[in-house]
Image (spheres, rainbow, N blue to C red):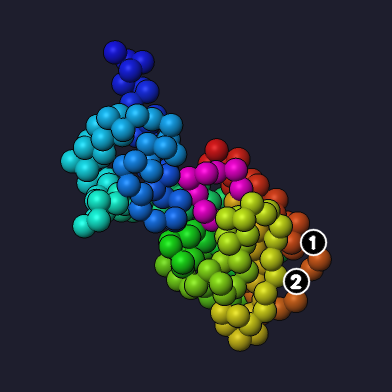
Amino acid sequence: MAAESAQTLERGLRLLRLLADGKGGRTPTELSAELSLSRPVVYRLLTTLMNEGFVRRDAEGRVHLGFGVLVLAQAVQPLLRAAALPTLRRLAEAVGATAHLTVAEGDDGLAVAVVEPSWTDMHVAYREGARHPLTKGAAGQAILALREGRDDYFVTEGQLQEGARGVAAPVTGLPWLEASVGVVTFGPLEESTGPRVVAAAAELSAALG
């Protein structure tokens, strides 16, 4: 019974991950094919997940994530922030720039953790909760690169704030998280900044993995 329950849980999680890939809703038949599960098994999973609010079906019968996942997402953000702060603090102090963790929310990037350096005379005031399109700024571009399977860092200037320079790298190796670690400053950045940001992203990935 325990093994059967674990298998059912694993299948349910696979189904949720599939619906979270940003490619839109699926029919039960499509889910059955993509998960390599029989349609009766998929229907049983959907019934349970719909009852709990984790999935919903539209008027055309396609299955989407339900609003119940928002409750889980809201609980995850404080955990992400707590896990990221030590890494961001070391990065901000080493580079002398404001460090941040940005996560994807649809087509936007959301700053969930921000740390300002303690020793600089001037730094960018970047607030937690700031939101911007993924197509603008280094943080968003790093997340888009992650979706393409790339792990290089990005440098931008003036895309989100005039005169501000940003460097960001994706947090790789975590299928459940689309995020990037970055720094932003008004001053010049040393050549070592890019590799430092990449190292910080890898450090955070290891902490969360």
Pointer 2: residues within 10 angstroms few (<14), some, or many (20+)?
A: some
Q: Give the CA separation, mark 1 to mark 2.
A: 8 Å
Circle 2: element type: loop
Q: Residue at x 24, y 32 (%)?
A: 44
Residue 143, position in %: x, y? Answer: 57, 60
Three-letter code for the amino acid on which mark 2 is drawn:
Leu
Residue 21, position in %: x, y? Answer: 46, 51
Residue 192's label in the rendered image is: 1
Three-letter code for the amino acid on which mark 1 is drawn:
Ser
Residue 189's label in the rendered image is: 2
Segment colored magenta: 172-182
Pointer 1: residues within 10 angstroms few (<14), some, or many (20+)?
A: few
Residue 168's label in the rendered image is: none
Residue 50, position in %: x, y? Answer: 22, 43
Closer-to-camera residue (161/33): 33
- Specify the quadrant of the image occupied by residue 88: bottom right
Q: Answer left or right for 186 relative to 8.
A: right
Q: Residue at x 52, y 44 (%)?
A: 175
Residue 42, position in %: x, y? Answer: 31, 34
- Specify the quadrant of the image occupied by residue 207: top right
Query: Most extreme residue toward the right, as rendered?
Result: 191
Tell me the quarter of the image containing the N terminus: top left
Circle 1: element type: loop
Q: Answer left or right for 30 relative to 195.
A: left
Q: Answer left or right for 47 relative to 25.
A: left
